[in-house]
Amino acid sequence: MPVFSRATSEQISQLAAIAQEVKMTESELLFREGDTPAIYILLEGELSLEPVAGGQPAFARAGDSIAVYETLGGEESTGWKAHVTRGGLALRVEREALFDLLADHI
């Protein structure tokens, strides 16, 4: 992720320590409007991201990061519904844990 491109290996290790593994099952909702934003890093699988305001869905695949700007920007909601279209695995970094880490390691 570009936002962490200047992080040291020690800082990346600390980031990994606060990341939670999330198993994604096909056809489930990974998150929906109203959920507190968190960063999702897709390791395996695929998502269809449906904008709540309407419009064309976006798609995410392994290697993509989701909801980075909403999480870092303090948004109340992502404005998206994330449907799992192919099961897999993601890492979830919650906003509060990330901000606590960044407070000590900007």
Image (cartoon, helix red, strand yellow):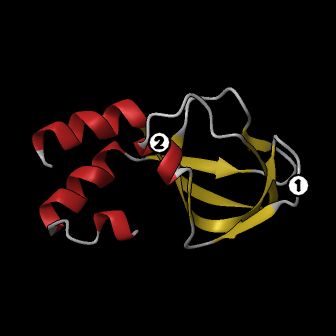
Give the structural element (helix, strand or loop) at label 2: helix
**Which residue type carries mark 1?**
Gly
| Residue drawn where x is 12% and y is 47% of the image | 105
Residue 53 placement: quadrant: top right
| Residue drawn where x is 56% and y is 28% of the image | 76
Which one is earlier in the sequence, the residue at label 2 or at label 1?
1
Q: Position of residue 92 (x, y in %)?
A: 50, 46
Q: Position of residue 30 (x, y in %)?
A: 71, 43
Identify the residue position indicated by label 1 in the image.
55
| Residue drawn where x is 24% and y is 61% of the image | 12
**Number of the label disc, if any, that sits on residue 71:** 2
Single out the mark in the foreground, 2 or 1: 1
The quarter of the image holding the N terminus is bottom left
Considering only vertical position in the picture, is 26 above or below 3?
A: above
Q: Position of residue 26 (x, y in %)?
A: 83, 54
In the shown orientation, is residue 99 left or right of residue 55?
left
